Image (cartoon, rainbow, N blue to C red):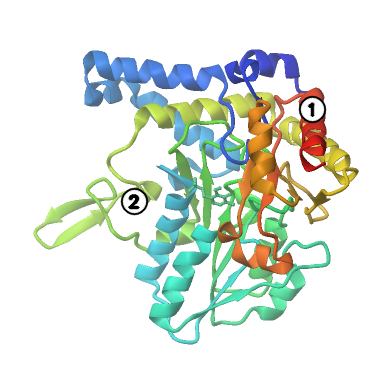
Amino acid sequence: MINVEALRASTPGCAHVTHLNNAGCALPPAIVTDTMVSHLRLEEAIGGYEAYSQARDRVAGVYASVGALVNAPIERVALVESATVAWDRGLQAIAFSDPLEPGDRMLVSGSEYASNVLPLLQLARRTGASVEVIPDGDDGSVDVEALGDMLDERVRIVSVNHAPSQNGLVNDVVAIGDMLRMHGSPAWYLVDACQSVGQLPVDMGRIGCDVLSATGRKFLRGPRATGFLVVSQRMLDDLEPFPLDLHAATWTTLDDYDLAEGAARFESWEKAYAALLGMGAAIDYALACGIESLAERISLLARRARTGLAEIPGVVVRDRGSVQSGIVTIRVDDPAGVVAGLRGRGINTSLSTPDYSRIDFGRDQAPGLVRISPHAYNTEAEVDRAVAAIAELVR
Ligand SMILES: Cc1ncc(COP(=O)(O)O)c(C=O)c1O
């Protein structure tokens, strides 16, 4: 059970704004900022490398925190600067070590994020492979049976997001993993957990994907420019990341090198340790709250928003999915104007535009959407105030 008052007391931003933009970048709890600032002060006082030496154990703890969050061994965790970098590192390893050929197929969900589709389109152009969209089921999420029908030995990549940045649905990434295994598919399975970590349980062991990518700043409430990648044992056994740096591998002789142990080979040498320690603090905070409890409260607030918004003339709640996330999107005549009007009233939301997810937006030609994404620290009164303000703005 979430203690909302305690969450708010530990979140300084709650005193200043009604922040319903947690799918963009959440308000961090004070422990996140304090952790970062104290590491920066240490760097200031004794030097960056020396500060790292002192913080080494705590940095190791961040890998353990990620492992606990997504149920994965720490050797398979890499710390990076964003979800996109995490996902790209996985794809680069595939493209380098297991190159695609003409006729190969890459399957994506219908609500895939632009930064995940663009590199696949690049690969398709260069190799003669194709990008195909997995049909939606009746509820709008990935149709797992239809995916099964599409699978053959030419399907080399399956890329699905757990919770899209728009449209409210949650894809059944466990069932998709089960389907791939049932068919004995050789495809590399990439799961974008950017919007799900921190608001929904994410279990790498059950999903069984090869690449799980996530960011620190959204529902996890960590700092900007933090993220992580978790890879399968198969990624470590069969693939080599590209390009390697001197942390990812050791240059052993003039013309040879040894790969680093575990997922460190997917990382860079240089890291923003203050930020990564901040992400670790955010994960520990979320784990202490309990992911199931967070999920329950976020879902309650999102349902309240959907119900209230659905009653407003001139507002269409655009969300789909039989399981829904804390991301609520609505169609209105002037979405940018509504987001700006809300901002003027101290309410943060965001604007989702078609270039972020072309396939999804192509369905109903929505020109843009207002996205309302509550977190557990928001109150029912804040949600109601946002709903009332939207009613006023669309009048
Ligand atoms: C579903 C999804 N995937 C990936 C990303 C990219 O995350 P990042 O900006 O951390 O690279 C986003 C960002 O909004 C997202 O919503």
Q: Left or right: 196 with respect to 270?
A: right
Disc 2 residue type (three-letter): Arg
Q: Mark 1 points at which residue?
A: 385
Please say whether residue 349 is visible from this viewpoint: no
Residue furthest out toward the bottom: 103
Judging from the image, what secondary structure is the residue with disc 2 in? Answer: helix
Q: Where 106 falls versus 213 (above or below)? A: below
Residue lying farthest left? 254
Of all residues shown, which one is farthest toward the front? 395
Label 2 sits on residue: 265
Q: In this view, does 210 lie above or below 120?
A: above
Sequence-wise, the earlier of marks 1 and 2 is: 2
Question: In front here: 61 or 91?
Answer: 91
90 left or right of 209 in image: left
Between disc 1 and disc 2, the foreground one is 1
Q: Residue 218, percent across and down?
A: 58, 38
Residue under the point 52% across and 18% down = 31
Q: Which mark identifies residue 355?
A: none
